Image: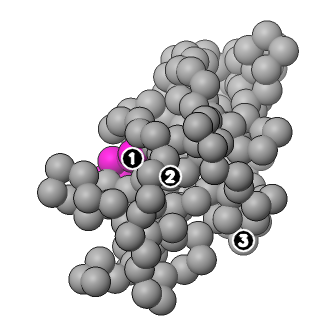
Amino acid sequence: MLTANHQEEAKHFIDFPTDFVCFGLGNEEYGIDLSKVQELHDYESVTRIDNAPGYVKGVIRLYDVTVPIIDLRIKLKLAKAIYNEMTSVIILNLSGQMLGIVVDGVFDVITFTTDQVLHMPAPDKRTRSSFMLGIGTRGKRTITLVDIEELLGSDQLYADVDLAH
């Protein structure tokens, strides 16, 4: 259980209760706000983009929209991904812009309340933890809750990906 001070700090970053889509990357479990998720897809081949950052796998066409696909393992500098039948793409809608993230697998949706989340101290924006909202616990599970827009830097991402190709 969190102290009242931690609960109060957490409320400033996330409105609780909040639903999170939980997914795996390697041996870790992460969660992103369900309101940012548009849909889920199996991983399939993508069209490569010349001169795109290494973490951009390419693009797919979805509903006549060109959607960049980001491999979160590469973005987070984790071990090389192995694509298999569990590999999924989470299609996000971030401020009206669609993009997909490749994850090892999507597990479920969990509603977290304030007392189930350990709020992270205010991060230094230069560190990898600047995207972490907190650590959610559910039974024996520990889930890193992330601000997906902060993690992806979606404004910069679209500037980096030339979709004219």
| Label 1 neighbour load within 10 Å: few <14, some 14-19, many 20+ | many
Please give the name of the residue rendered at 38% of the width and 70% of the height, measured from the top-left corner. 47
Q: Could you tell me if the residues under marks 2 and 1 are in contact, i.e. CB atoms within 8 Å? A: yes
| Label 3 neighbour load within 10 Å: few <14, some 14-19, many 20+ | few
The first of marks 3 and 1 along the sequence is 1
Q: Is residue 156 above or below residue 151?
A: below
Say which of marks 2 and 3 sits in front.
Answer: 2
The residue lying toward the viewer, choosing from 140 and 46, is 46
What residue does disc 3 label?
126
Which amino acid type is shown beneath numbered disc 3?
A: Arg
Task: Inspect this view and state whether residue 4 appears.
Answer: no
Distance between the alpha carbons at the discs numbered 3 and 1 = 24 Å
The first of marks 2 and 3 along the sequence is 2
Distance between the alpha carbons at the discs numbered 2 and 1 = 8 Å
**Numbered badge on residue 92:** 1
Which amino acid type is shown beneath numbered disc 1?
A: Leu
**Numbered badge on residue 101:** 2
Task: Inspect this view and state whether residue 50 appears.
Answer: yes
Q: Secondary structure at mark 1?
A: strand
Q: Quadrant of the C terminus?
A: bottom left
Which amino acid type is shown beneath numbered disc 2?
A: Ile
Please give the name of the residue rendered at 67% of the width and 65% of the height, measured from the top-left corner. 74
The first of marks 2 and 1 along the sequence is 1
Q: Position of residue 145 (x, y in %)?
A: 65, 37
| Left or right of residue 63: residue 54 | right
Please give the name of the residue rendered at 54% of the width and 80% of the height, measured from the top-left corner. 53
Distance between the alpha carbons at the discs numbered 2 and 3 = 22 Å
